[in-house]
Amino acid sequence: MQAVEIKHLTKKFTNNQIAVRDLTLSINQGEVFGFLGPNGAGKTTTIKLLNGMLQPTSGKMQILGEDPTKDPIAIHQFSGVLTERAAMYDQLTGMENLLFYGEVFGLSQEDSRKRGLDLLEQLELSYAADRKLTSYSTGMRQRLSLARAMIHQPKVLFLDEPTSGLDPESVLSVNRLIQDLAKNQGVTVFLCTHQLRYAQEICTSYGLLDEGELLATGTLESLRHRVSKGLKVEVQANRISPDLHCKLLGKDRFEFTLIDEQEIPELVRKIVQSGSDIYGVTAKQLTLEEIYFALLEEGGPVHD
């Protein structure tokens, strides 16, 4: 069973604005799936649709086999949601907030407290457990919101800009937690962000979105193959034989186009045998950001 299954999902609002257009994708369990695109691309609308907060105009979707349009309450029992404006109670302490939401999800107060203490420790908030939210910084509130979304141990976790407002150390602790959830606990993480460099560091697969339309889905490697038919390799050498076809980048810098990384040793051997001295060899892999802009230039969706 797929963790998330979406087929031809469309959401049109009353002003005829199409927020999500014919979206089709499938996400395996245990993935950290990066749903990526600029603000206004349709990421948050998709999360709301998947959790039964909005009704689709057309299309079908399932979360672990359940249809959010028919039984959103069932979805909420095994999914957790973190949005940029998560509802919390300012006059309660951090722990009191977690106890409240734990009981909302059907946990006993004892289980809620145990789970809350564990999450506060993982997110480095134990010191603020008994402080009211009015004293929390933006980053602290964001981490507590993540703890709230995870209090009932969801099998699918929807995160909308989870590192917004966090300092670098907090980002690291959140990232470690996300990766542990997926790798060691089998939780599927549906992560929405416009920060493509961040997503490249943490996600295992991606969906690239623009104006509500899916441009492409896949792993980083598969996306690279879609937009580039070769691997660019930069070689720093005192000279290159004319027999070895390459592009001159600058003084002592040459660029070769290979099929894949397995051809690099043979290229180095040929350069050395031709009498050249090599100072450095760098495989220039396309970044997720470069892939995204390449797909935009192609001007059309590409599906698996």
Image (tube, rainbow, N blue to C red):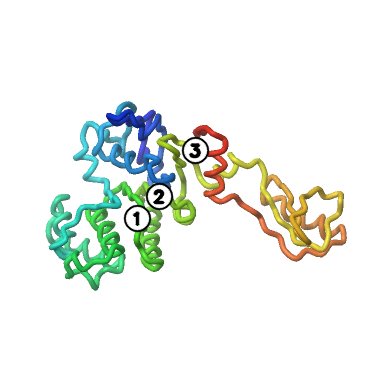
Residue at the outermost top position: 58
Verify CB contact (< 8 Å) between mark 1 and mark 3: no
Q: Amino acid at mark 2?
A: Thr
- Residue occupying image coordinates x 80% and y 57%: 269
What whole-number distance in Å separates the C-alpha atoms at marks 2 and 1?
A: 8 Å
Q: Residue at x 72, y 50 (%)?
A: 263
Question: From what the image shows, is residue 95 above or below residue 289?
Answer: below
Q: What residue does disc 2 label? A: 193
Kindly state the secondary structure of the residue where label 1 is placed.
loop
The circle drawn on residue 162 is: 1
Q: Disc 2, disc 1: CB below 8 Å?
A: yes
Q: Residue furthest front?
A: 15
Q: Are marks 3 and 2 in contact (CB under 8 Å)?
A: no
Label 2 crowd bin: few (<14), some (14–19), many (20+), radius 10 Å? many
Residue behind mark 3: 216
Q: At numbered mark 2, what does the secondary structure look like: helix, strand or loop?
A: strand
Q: Residue furthest bottom?
A: 127
Q: Earlier in the sequence, mark 1 or mark 3?
A: 1
Mark seen at residue 75: none
Residue 13: quadrant of the picture: top left
- Looking at the picture, how far across and down is residue 252, in whole percent? 78, 61
Q: Residue at x 32, y 39 (%)?
A: 45
Camera-nearest label, 3 or 2? 2
User: Disc 3 to disc 2, how far (Cα)?
Assistant: 16 Å
Quarter of the figure with residue 121: bottom left
Left or right: 229 in relation to 149:
right
Q: Position of residue 255 (x, y in %)?
A: 73, 52
Kind of residue at badge 1: Pro
| Other-residue count near label 1 (Cα within 10 Å), few / some / many at <14 / 14–19 / ≥20 | many
Residue at x-position 27% and y-position 40%? 51
Percent of width and height locating residue 59: 34, 27
> Which one is in front, 41 or 204?
41
